[in-house]
Image (cartoon, rainbow, N blue to C red):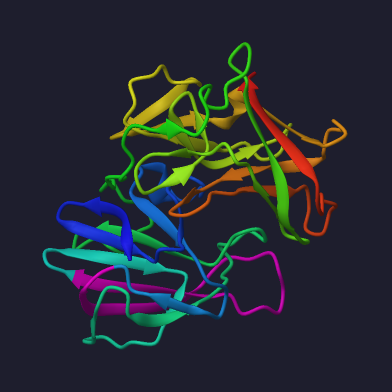
Amino acid sequence: MKLAATCKDIKLMAPDDAMLSFFKSPFAAHETGSAVDIAYGDFGGVAHSPVDGVVVDIREFDTPTPFKDRDFKEYLTAIRCGEFIVKILHVKPDVEIGDSVRCGEEFGTFIKSGYFYFWNFSHLHVEVRMPDDYLRASNNMPLDIPVGAVSSSKDKDGVGVGGVFEFSGEVVFSDERYALIDCPDHSSGGDLNGYSANGYLLDGFIPADEHALHRFGLIGGGNNDLPFETFRSIGNSHMVQSSGVDLRVFDEKNHRLPVAGASFILFFGNPLIKLIPTRYGESLPQCGKVTIILCVR
């Protein structure tokens, strides 16, 4: 298990093969940098506790969904850790109230609720909360993200002429939900690896064209100028309105690909970029080289 984030004296841990995102989700706690999504395994697979503690509450509830005749139950598990509560969503717990759990222990199975997009990985949504306030969606207890100064595997850190950030790599997986791109020139901010713009790791979904506008994060302890205009800073992270960033994706023949956007995620291991189709099942590249370009609009 490796450190995913801290808050107060609570350490949130994740398996060595996990992926992390602090800003890819539009839900309330991510808006304040107070939640981390820890992704690994698959839906129906085993989820491991990110902390030591005692289970003090389990809630089951229905989630909104546009699909009929589907049971999209969601579960909230509250684990008491010293003075605080660690809140976990998207896992059906196998434990009961009063049970003790240890970090790394199996405590439930991953579910896909109505909160999920079709392209989401299975993951735990994790927050640190006060004991009298862990049920509301909103949270303002920001996490400390273990990313320091970001180093790149190439001198120019993905920057081209005129402040354009370019990432080129090979398709290593593709299906109806998403394609994964392995770009060799990745960056590192300690134990966490990803792709960077001017010394800051990118974290979150960046749409192409007029697809749903969102925001994403820039994470790192560097002293470089921020590559995009930001609207909020939280510790070593900075939030960007994606409407100010142009994202374009090209295949190896330099044909522009019709995609909804790209999702940048943090990895303990080799990082990948996720390409999202405009709709479920729409065409994505099955193999070959892909180039992703970011620039200020």
Residue 247: give x, y in percent of width and height.
68, 30
Q: Nearer the viewer, residue 114 or 192?
A: 192
Q: Please report the residue visible at 31 percent of the width from the left and 66 percent of the height from the top.
A: 87
Label tally: 0
197 horizontally vs 53: left or right: right
Residue positioned most to the left: 83
200 shown above or below 172 = above
Q: Is residue 255 above or below residue 265?
A: above
Residue shown at the point (62%, 18%) measured from the top left: 160
Q: Which residue is painted at 61% across and 80% down in the image? A: 71
Q: Quick check: is 263 in the magenta stretch?
A: no
Position of 253 with respect to 149 (left or right) is right
Toward the viewer: 154 or 91? 154
Which span of residues is magenta-colored?
51-80
Give me the residue at 31% from left, 45% from top.
145
Expressed as whole percent of the image width and height from the top left, the position of residue 295 reads 63, 22
Q: Residue extending furthest front?
A: 154
**Where residue 154 sits in the image (x, y, percent)?**
53, 29
Q: Residue 9 is drawn in which quadrant? A: bottom left
Is residue 6 left or right of 193 when viewed as pictured? left
Q: Quadrant of residue 52?
A: bottom left
* Quarter of the C terminus within the rendering: top right
Residue 223: x and y in percent read: 33, 20
**Magenta residues, dominant SS class:** strand
Q: Quadrant of the N terminus?
A: bottom left
Q: Is residue 72 magenta?
A: yes
